[in-house]
Image (cartoon, rainbow, N blue to C red):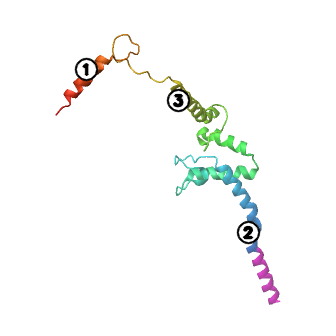
Amino acid sequence: MIKTRRLLAVVVFVAAACMPLAVLPLFAQQTEHAKQVGGKFMCMCNCSQVLTQCNHVGCTTSAAMLKELDQAIARGDSETSITQMFVQEFGTKVYAEPPKSGLSLVAWSLPTVYLVVGAGLVIFVISRWRKRPAPQPAALAGGGGGTQTVSPDILARAREQAARDTED
């Protein structure tokens, strides 16, 4: 009789010890989903951290938000309804990453547009510089503006002057 009671006690103890292991996969799945959804929101305690990564000791804001998130997931709310709930409560500043729609879509696409337009402008300017005609040598004498040759008389005098100026 004592052996059966001990055996029964051991079986009950082992069953009770294994119970969390049976429930753990379901709970882990919910928390993983909560982490995924919670990673899309900012903690509203002004720490500028994602909700699931707020590391302030005793942060009541993130604790309350995470509790609210867990309750919504436990109810089976969709991700969009959870998002709408947080946006209604905290405003659009709750987004960790703004949605890519409407005016936000314009803000997301402008850097790409600027890059493409800037590269096009640089290519246009460089091609214009390359197509520019080579500069013509300036006229050496006379006011006619055209290219004139120097007469042999003037050239001889200039050489003589240069030779006299460079003599030691």
First of labels 2, 1 by sequence position: 2
Q: Secondary structure at mark 1?
A: helix
Magenta span: helix, strand or loop, mainly? helix
* Mark 1 crowd level (few <14, some 14–19, many ≥20, 10 Å Cα): few
Q: Secondary structure at mark 3?
A: helix
* Mark 3 crowd level (few <14, some 14–19, many ≥20, 10 Å Cα): few
Q: Exactly how many numbered labels are in the figure? A: 3
Q: Can residue 153 be seen at all in this image of the molecule?
A: yes
Looking at the image, which is closer to me, 132 or 71? 132
Q: Residue at x 58, y 54 (%)?
A: 53
Q: Quadrant of the N terminus?
A: bottom right
Type of the residue with mark 2: Pro
The residue that mark 3 highlights is 126
Type of the residue with mark 3: Ile
The residue that mark 2 highlights is 20
Compute the Cα span from label 3 to label 2: 70 Å
Answer left or right for 134 relative to 17.
left
The image shows residue 11, relative to residue 3, as above or below, that is: above
Instruction: Give residue 125's position: percent from left, percent from top.
Output: 53, 27
Looking at the image, which is closer to me, 162 or 90? 162
Tell which residue pokes out farthest to the left in this image. 168
Q: Which mark is residue 8?
A: none
Q: In the figure, residue 3 lies in which quadrant?
A: bottom right
The residue that mark 1 highlights is 157
First of labels 1, 3 by sequence position: 3
